Amino acid sequence: MKRPYYKKAITVSEQIDLLENKGMDFFDKNLAHNTLSTIGYYRFSGYAYPFRNNVDHSSFVDDTSFEKVYSIYEFDRSLKSLLFSYLARIEIAFRTLVIDKFSIGKGTALWYADSTNFINIAEHDDFLATLEYDLENSREDFVNHFRNNYCDTFPPAWIALQIVSFGTLIKLYRNFNDRELQSQVAKTFGCESVERFISWMNTLVYLRNICSHHARLWNRPIKKRPEAYNFGVKGKRWTNDDVSKLYYSICVIGSLLKNIIPHNLFKTELSELFESNPYVNSTKSKFLGFPKDWQTEFQW
């Protein structure tokens, strides 16, 4: 049975007292006060939750310190920043490939506006309605230039598809009825299966949204699970639990990057991030799904 929410707002000092009464250690209460004042108790508690006692969920296990939990928060912040920068490179490459290959393949830069190029006409109509709204309200210089100098209803794909969201572009790609052109884009990323590629890209949108909205990524199940693949390792099998952990999504990102930016530093930067966070590094298998040999398990 549902009940009314009864908890009231409390001061930062009271928040510290509450955590201390639950068994959390503090080595620097000034740091704790400043931290909770800027990131908030509720956000912080998401990182502290796994350290609650399994018997008594209202208390923390021994050796749980504010500083340890805060170090995880800082790691997560750096991890999201790293992922966001590489996800942006994948998104830009995907956007460019869809625009170029579909425009050349169809012999027109207005292929996206032609409903005969799409499987689901209603979905395509919704896309055009959204695009018209976005074009009308865009303040981008390149959109204004087109609007002020040309009488066409829609601009070429290299203008129009710059302002649609990553998720919208993936839906447009998925709805496209030319399998060969879809495959050309997927294969450029090293993915032989269009369905798997779409699954992976949907996961990347999910991760990008987590990063851009500053939500917790550490110890978070990946709800938009990507399709499993062995990345060329014979006999490798992923369980549903494996695919729901961040490590598998990291492998997807690394695999895609390897094909569009062969000499990227993603793995190196990720390794350095772990090395600079000893506690997270020691628990990455439990909370993130990383195996001990993650740096050599796959060639990405």
Image (cartoon, rainbow, N blue to C red):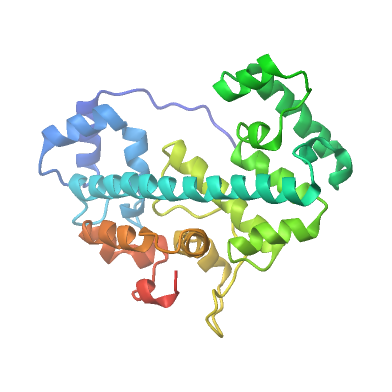
- Give percent across and percent down for residue 202: 62, 50
Q: Tell me if 95 is positioned left or right of 258 in this view.
A: right
Give the residue drawn at x 71%, y 44%.
171
- Give percent across and percent down for residue 267: 36, 63
Give the residue drawn at x 59%, y 66%.
190
The front one of 145 and 252 is 145
Above or below residue 283? Residue 67 is: above
The front one of 74 and 174 is 174
Q: Tell me if 68 is positioned left or right of 145 in this view.
A: left
Q: Is residue 71 visible?
A: yes
- Give percent across and percent down for residue 259: 52, 64
- Give percent across and percent down for residue 248: 49, 64
How many numbered discs?
Answer: 0
Above or below residue 123? Residue 104 is: below
The front one of 118 and 162 is 162
Within the image, what quadrant is residue 128 found in?
top right
Q: Where the N terminus falls, by quadrant?
A: top right
The front one of 29 and 110 is 110
Give the residue drawn at x 41%, y 37%.
214
Give the residue drawn at x 27%, y 56%.
273
Within the image, what quadrant is residue 199 found in?
bottom right
Q: Can residue 224 be seen in this view?
A: no
Q: Tell me if 14 is positioned left or right of 100 in this view.
A: left
Above or below residue 226? Residue 37 is: above
